[in-house]
Image (cartoon, rainbow, N blue to C red):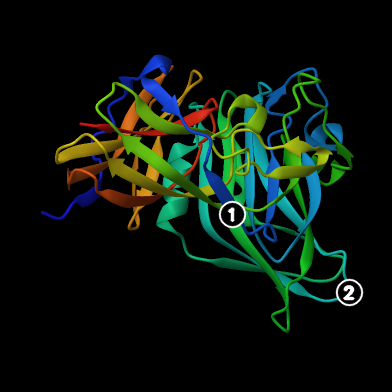
């Protein structure tokens, strides 16, 4: 009988202890590094007593992006005020350009996770195009949100910037927020981080889409579950040598630990070395504290909106009737949503 591979519809979390994992380090990745990631997670927390809003003359991030890419932002409003979050596009060039926003998902709620925004991103959305004349500013209104105090807010959105000939063009994007609309044009300097030294990234990353290859998920009769860590540096035990991490260049530069904002195309090879035909599962979980699993397969998303908790794993793919000695390739899209703790682990086991 031929093995069948399907997404799991039951993502109930279960504990997998560190001692149960057999972590591999022979994974590898490929990324199209030409696509820009406009990334801003700093200041992560907006608070009273810090100069962070346009009302204070501040913006969160301002960077030049070119061609095709993604906007990814995440902040928490603890200012005690209702604010408006906005992305402003500025054309510093001499030619009129357009920016098209697609596949957007927005966060605006009390949860720390943006897993629902990722679900909406995967579902797709009607593309909206904005024209930006030379030396002009345009608000990307489809990404604008009114955020009451106590709410987390963020953006996941693909963009494409071209000139009239269809060639890739550039714009300066600015992530900022204001309490009083009369002050929105006052944002002329970089906002301070609420906790200096936390190194929350803001800038532009080199890529938005990574292929991740895990070649040796060989399940045996031992109690070990073969798996790979990701979302961390090679020095922290990444099963992919840290190749999945993008580098953020800007006002707070460095490796983007956690892979936030990056779409991951998982390609796993699972082998049945148990000696008999059986059913197997692929699970995702965090080696840290918090985790919100999500995968997308054949256009459908499977996810949890509540925190799985420390060392909790969810089954995301099911392999039925895998013959002894047989190997299969399992493929799905996934991300590490905001609110999750890296490293994340993908593992396989016999059901």
Q: Nearer the viewer, mark 2 or mark 1?
A: 1
Which residue is the extreme one toward the left? 1
Which residue is the extreme one toward the bottom? 165
Q: Earlier in the sequence, mark 2 or mark 1?
A: 1
Q: The C terminus appears in which quarter of the rendering?
A: top left
What percent of the width, then of the height, locates residue 311?
42, 18
What percent of the width, then of the height, locates residue 251?
84, 38
The residue that appears at 28% across and 31% down in the rendered structure is 220
Q: In this rendering, is residue 265 above or below 40?
A: below
Residue position marked by numbered label 2 in the rendering: 94
Residue position marked by numbered label 1 in the rendering: 30
Q: Residues within 10 Å of mark 2 (few under 14, many from 20)?
A: few
The residue closer to the viewer here, 201 or 210, is 210
What percent of the width, then of the height, locates residue 41?
68, 34
Q: The N terminus appears in which quarter of the rendering?
A: bottom left
User: In the rendered view, does 196 fall on the left or right side of 11?
Assistant: right
Q: Are marks 2 and 1 in contact (CB under 8 Å)?
A: no
Res 100 visible: yes
The residue that appears at 16% across and 38% down in the rendered structure is 278
The residue closer to the viewer here, 283 or 159, is 283
Q: In this rendering, is residue 161 above or below 177?
A: below
User: In the rendered view, does 126 fall on the left or right side of 247?
Assistant: left
**Which structural element holds mark 1?**
strand
């Amino acid at each position: 009988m031929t093995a069948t591979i399907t997404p799991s519809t039951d993502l109930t979390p279960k504990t997998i202890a560190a001692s149960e994992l057999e972590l591999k380090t022979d994974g590898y990745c490929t990324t199209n590094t030409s696509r820009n990631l406009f990334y801003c997670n700093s200041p992560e927390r907006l608070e009273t007593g810090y100069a962070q809003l346009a009302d204070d003359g501040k913006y969160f991030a301002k960077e030049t992006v070119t061609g095709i890419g993604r906007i990814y932002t995440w902040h928490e409003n603890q200012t005690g005020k209702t604010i408006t979050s906005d992305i402003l596009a500025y054309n510093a060039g001499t030619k009129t350009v357009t920016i098209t926003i697609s596949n957007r998902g927005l966060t605006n709620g009390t949860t720390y996770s943006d897993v629902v925004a990722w679900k909406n991103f995967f579902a797709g959305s009607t593309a909206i195009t904005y024209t930006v004349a030379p030396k002009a500013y345009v608000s990307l209104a489809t990404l604008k949100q009114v955020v009451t105090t106590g709410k987390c807010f963020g953006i996941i959105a693909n963009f494409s910037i071209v000139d009239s000939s269809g060639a890739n063009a550039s714009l300066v994007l600015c992530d900022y927020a204001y309490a009083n609309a009369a002050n929105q044009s006052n944002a002329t300097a970089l906002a301070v981080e609420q906790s200096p030294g936390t190194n929350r990234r803001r800038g532009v990353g080199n890529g938005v889409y990574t292929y991740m290859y895990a070649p040796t998920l060989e399940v045996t009769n031992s109690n070990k579950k073969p798996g790979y860590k990701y979302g961390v540096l090679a020095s922290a035990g990444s099963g992919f040598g840290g190749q999945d991490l993008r580098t953020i260049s800007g006002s707070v530069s460095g490796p983007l630990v956690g892979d936030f904002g990056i779409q991951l195309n998982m390609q796993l090879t699972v082998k049945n070395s148990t000696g008999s035909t059986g059913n197997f599962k692929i699970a995702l979980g965090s080696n840290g504290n918090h985790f919100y699993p999500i995968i997308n397969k054949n256009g459908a998303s499977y996810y949890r909106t509540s925190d799985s908790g420390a060392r909790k794993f969810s089954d995301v793919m099911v392999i039925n009737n895998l013959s002894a000695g047989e190997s299969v390739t399992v493929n799905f899209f996934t991300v590490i949503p905001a609110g999750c703790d890296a490293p994340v682990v993908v593992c396989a086991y016999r059901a």
